[in-house]
Amino acid sequence: MQVTVKLFASFRTGRTPIEVCDYPAGTTVADLVSERGIPVTELGIMLINCRHVHLDRELADGDIVAIFPLLGGG
Amino acid sequence: MSRLDAYLTGLAVNGLISTSCQLDASLHFDLTFAEVEAAILGLGLCPARYQRNRQTIPCAGQLALLRSTVAVIGCGGLGGYVIEELARLGVGRIDAVDPDVFEEHNLNRQLLATLANLGEHKVTAAARRVCDITPAVALVPHRTAFSAENGRELLLGATVVVDALDNIPARFQLAAVCRELGIPLVHGAIAGWYGQVATQHAGQDISPFLCGPGVGAKGVETNLGNPSFTPAVVASLQVAEACKVILSLGDAARGRMLVLNLLEMEFEEISL
């Protein structure tokens, strides 16, 4: 299945900001994150097709995944 | 017409009352500067300091701002700019909450941090700054950290609350107390070139968007730090949101979060 992965803010540094990837059925958001070497502690909002999702969410063909870093400063 | 109203009307020039006339009136009638400001605005006149507001915020709106209370939770990078802008906007009461003193590493971005006040409590410096800008605005300093225990007491009576905190657990508690009290909350957070703003209206819950799957108290600002301009931008957006909430104007970021990337000058909108 084909999935579009969009990274935002500091997650773009040293990574491809937007790419269309082939993944086997059963792939989860956690797999995408791990594959890109993003520490879970830095993860903020994660969306699939503009809807908030958790790490264990399985991907479907045509999904657009957006991953934002956690911002906590003031 | 009361004697005060007649006095003020007689002093108005093109609908404006100068600050010195406002001060004279407060002495003459034994009223506070803020009470005279309310009387001026109630007459449809304008304190001269707000003359550049008039086309954006009419006298009735300026009076609503004067009668409102904004609680600013955190007086660091975001909070310093938020307090400055709320005071210049003419919000009548600002409750400023922060336990910390200024340190050298605050000088790169925190508006109220100066060489002269290193070691001073942030809320004390904030009160002095507001005094320097206008006697019509009361800044009430709270030298304490916001918590689930003192939250209700600190927020009670607030028209709107501004989240200028620097850690995620406190933000969660703040959002929860605001929901419980039904007080609108304007959230802001920053890290490096990046920032986010969202408004939690009564009946809404933005807390799922304030954290990630990790359990840490901090975000990527731990690695990225914060430069001077990011808090200024995000704080200004927060004050614009707070102003609209108070005045029921425009389109507050209802049900959406604005995510800013100042490095690539991109602005994303996330549905909450």
Image: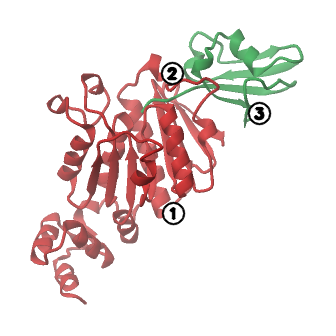
Chain colours: A green, B red
The chain letter under disc 1 is B
**Which residue carries the number 3 mark?**
A49
Percent coordinates x, y for residue B223 in the rendering: 46, 16
Look at the picture and state if B265 lies above or below B150: above
Residue located at (60% from left, 40% from top) = B207
Name the element at disc 3.
loop
Depth-wise, is mark 1 or mark 2 nearer the camera? Answer: 2
The chain letter under disc 3 is A
Q: Is residue B215 visible?
A: yes
Q: Is residue B58 visible?
A: no
Q: Of callouts 1 and 2, which one flags the residue occurring earlier in the amino acid sequence?
A: 2
Give how far apart the Cα atoms at labels 3 and 1 are.
Answer: 31 Å
Counting the numbered discs, the total is: 3
Percent coordinates x, y for residue B48 in the rendering: 23, 64
Name the quadrant containing residue B143. top left
- Specify whether B214 is left or right of B243: right
Residue located at (41% from left, 21% from top) = B225
Q: Are marks 3 and 1 in contact (CB under 8 Å)?
A: no
| The C terminus of chain B: image quadrant | top right
Q: Tag 3: residue type?
A: Asn
Q: Tag 1: residue type?
A: Ser
Name the element at disc 2.
loop
Residue located at (20% from left, 76% from top) = B12
Mark 2 residue crowding within 10 angstroms, few (<14) / some (14–19) / many (20+): many
**Which residue carries the number 1 mark?**
B248
Look at the picture and state if B186 lies above or below B191: below
**Which residue carries the number 2 mark?**
B220
Percent coordinates x, y for residue A62 in the rendering: 85, 26
The reply to the same-chain question for discs 1 and 2 is yes
